[in-house]
Amino acid sequence: MHQIDAALPQTQCTRCGEPDCRRYAEAIAEGRLAINRCPPGGAQGVVRLAGLTGQPIAPLDAGCGVEGPLKLAVIDEAWCIGCTLCIKACPVDCIIGASKRMHTVIDDQCTGCELCLPVCPVDCIEMVPVSVERTGWAAWSPAQADASKERYEFHQWRTAREQLEHDDRLAAKAMAKLADLPHLTKGGDDAEMARKRAVIEAALQRARARRA
């Protein structure tokens, strides 16, 4: 699986139908998906994967897209509203900006995945071809793939850390709420208090399970 993953361009574009390149590599290794579902790798990418897997060379699956030149995302500064949705969608953290401030793309880090396009509410992002007639691996080097994979792995680590910190804050609030509830005694209101305690304790259990 690791050799297959290393043969992929690491654009993390999801066009193959998997959430990222690593999981596409896993699907190929397990025989769940064919080797012709990666437009960024192009025809040469299919040849590389065929050599690793023994699967026959086949044309790219048109349902996943077509091979083309490398494209970079360009944000129209005049229309950007600073919503940060494109920043959250970028799998390699190549878009910088702040809430209600103009965003911009770091050109040499953009993989051309196009995942920022559908989330932009004002359609201010355009994909601009930059490799002219060069396509597939002719437009994307192994060094760029390695750098993209490293940035993607950092992106995954960062978002997981932020989720844990968010869960910790919610758990702290839940514990404070639980501590504020009066001790249960017999009576009509006690059943409602017990229900609230059960809900809060269940939320805490879920937070602990995610941390584990």
Image (cartoon, helix red, strand yellow):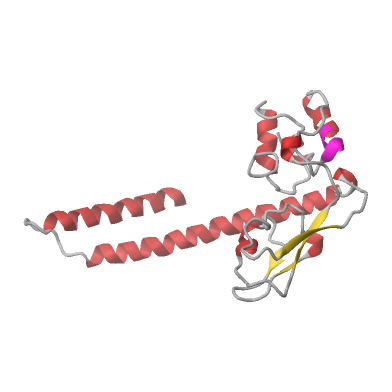
Q: Is residue 175 above or below residue 138?
A: below
Residue 45 lies in the magenta stretch: yes
Hey, which quadrant is residue 95 in on the image?
bottom right
Q: Residue at x 41, y 48 (%)?
A: 209
| 180 relative position to 107: left or right | left
196 lies above or below 49: below
Residue 132, image x, y percentages: 92, 53
Direction from residue 154 to residue 36 in the image, left or right: right
**In front of the other: 152 or 124:** 124
**Magenta-drawn segment:** 42-46
Q: What percent of the width, then of the height, locates residue 148?
A: 75, 53
Residue 155 percent location from the top left of the image:
64, 57
In depth, the one of 66 and 12 nearer the eye is 66
Is residue 185 positioned above or below 15 on the image?
below
- From the viewer's side, name the closer residue of 70 and 189: 70
Q: How many marks?
A: 0
Question: Where does the image place residue 201, in percent across and percent down from the top left?
Answer: 29, 53
Q: Is residue 49 magenta?
A: no
Residue at the (75%, 47%) spot, across then down: 10
Judge whether 76 appears above or below 209 on screen: below
